[in-house]
Image (cartoon, helix red, strand yellow):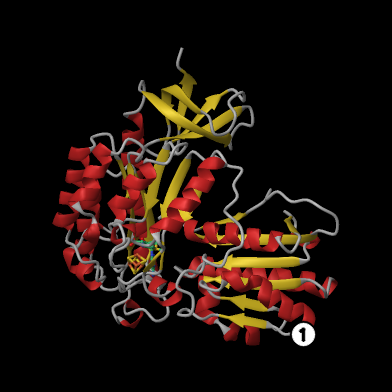
Amino acid sequence: MPPVRELTLVGFSLFSMGAKNLYLQTFGCQMNVYDSERICQLLAARNYRLVEDPSEADLIFLNTCSVRVKPEQKVYSALGRFQALKKKKPTLVIGIGGCLAQQEGGKFLQRFPYLDFVLGTKEFGRINEVLDDLEVLGKRGLAISLDGRIDPYASLPFPPSSSKATAFVSIMQGCDNFCSFCIVPYVRGREVSRPSRDILEEIRTLAAQRVKEVTLLGQNVNSYGNKTPGEIGFTGLLEAIQEIQGIERIRFTTSHPKDLSRALIDSFGRLSKLCEHIHLPLQSGSNRLLKRMNRGYSGEEYLERVDGLREACPEISVTSDVIVGFPGEEEADFQSTLDLVERVQFDDLFSFKYSDRPYTRAAEFHDKIPEDVSRRRLRELQALQRGITLKRNKLWEGKEVEVLVEGQSKANAEENMGRTRTNHIVNFPGKSDPHGTLVWLRIEKAFAHSLRGERRS
Ligand code: SAM
Ligand code: SF4
């Protein structure tokens, strides 16, 4: 998955007199962004509108991540800042939700007396109930059950609403894989697939709102439906989405290499709307460490899958995640990772220093790697990948590509930004193409993080 990033959702359309202000900060992955969009919908019913400045807020909600220690620390420092705001404005309500909220539960309420409520990863649907209790009874809220709600989205009152050309769609929750470094199964619960009927209805609604591209979200989309008798599997779901009029592009994340089936590999060459990009987390190139990580594949098997993907779809871009400094990682293990990264030639790579997480098996391993060694390995891996990414990006120069316009370029407000089907960012001159338009561009120049295009004459 792309690196943990911090973002504030703004611009959710709202209306009317007496509106209250919501400041919503989202940490972490696309799944959290999706959940935050649902929170916005639920709070819209209570007449909240989004604001960019927390000092204007009546309600501050932090949707948190606990996959590594860094995003966790960001949440604690944000909470410190917001305490000062509450001192100035005692009616301010502060709530916290998501993975860190699930992990810490009631401890949050004890530790931060100014915090008004804590919502776990499967309890977002109860935000209005919790706010009612707070407003009417003055009761601080704690809702962190992981088991009660099979489909935490089933209770949402509205169809999804989007003014964008792209949308995330959650197709499953939780994970059963228990990779030894990962906290996700403990804070998001066991794997549960959403009924395909609901997913398809959500995508049809999005298509009617002129959404062109959907990204299906799950911790391991490859095992979608496997635990539900009679449910279509993941490739069946892709085939059904392929038939939805108005949807032009389908993406998904994340795929676990151990469950990447032949049928899914073949879908890339077969389904015209399925974009030519796969995010396939490797984690390590050392078979010894892959075993210790409980990943369920070897480096050789990983390579076979990538070769199969490139055979079925030669233009596919492949991105990945790697952890360095996993407990017990010796120089030879790290060298195996560098060798595999060199051999695969990823289009992009998200690399992280191992971080101890509560509940996980790896947290109990004694052979931890010193911080300076992990840091040096991360630098070395990133330097290798920078060169590979640039080399891979250069292969696009002179080619013609279809780009979905997503908005203004970050670097230059006079330019547009869009993405190719292979998920490369392209900046190009002109502001005339409305967001959501598909345009054909010629790639003039490749950089480390983006491409530059010109309209095809
Ligand atoms: N489900 C996805 C998969 O199977 O790869 C990944 C989900 S995880 C939220 C995103 C990425 O965070 C992982 O691929 C891994 O590289 C990284 N990650 C997870 N736990 C970590 C830890 N304890 N320390 C460092 N990185 C970690
Ligand atoms: Fe975490 Fe592994 Fe599940 Fe991914 S597959 S969410 S890394 S336990």
Q: Is residue 51 something that shows in the picture?
A: yes
Residue 128 coordinates in the image, percent (x, y): 68, 71
Q: Does 410 appear above or below 444?
A: below
Q: Toward which corner of the image does residue 443 lie, by quadrant? A: top left
Front position in the image: 161 or 81: 161
Q: Toward which corner of the image does residue 411 lie, by quadrant? A: top right
Quarter of the picture containing the N terminus is: bottom left
Residue 352 coordinates in the image, percent (x, y): 39, 60
The secondary element bearing badge 1 is classed as: helix
Residue 121 coordinates in the image, percent (x, y): 51, 71
Q: Dividing the image into four quarters, tell me where ligand 2 lies.
A: bottom left
Name the side, left or right, on which 93 lies relative to 445: right
Front position in the image: 344 or 24: 24
Q: Does 420 appear above or below 288?
A: above
Q: Is residue 339 something that shows in the picture?
A: no
Q: Toward which corner of the image does residue 74 lie, by quadrant? A: bottom right
Residue at (59% x, 47% y) in the render: 162
Residue on which the image places disc 1? 137
What amino acid is labelled 1 in the image? Leu
Name the side, left or right, on which 283 lies relative to 203: left
Residue at (58% x, 54% y) in the render: 159
Q: How many marks are shown on the rendered structure? A: 1
Label 1 CA crowd tier, 10 Å (few <14, some 14–19, many 20+): few
Q: Does 429 appear above or below 8?
A: above
Name the side, left or right, on which 246 lies relative to 178: right
Residue at (32% x, 45% y) in the render: 239
- Whether ligand 1 has any atom under 8 Å from the Cβ at mark 1 is answered as no
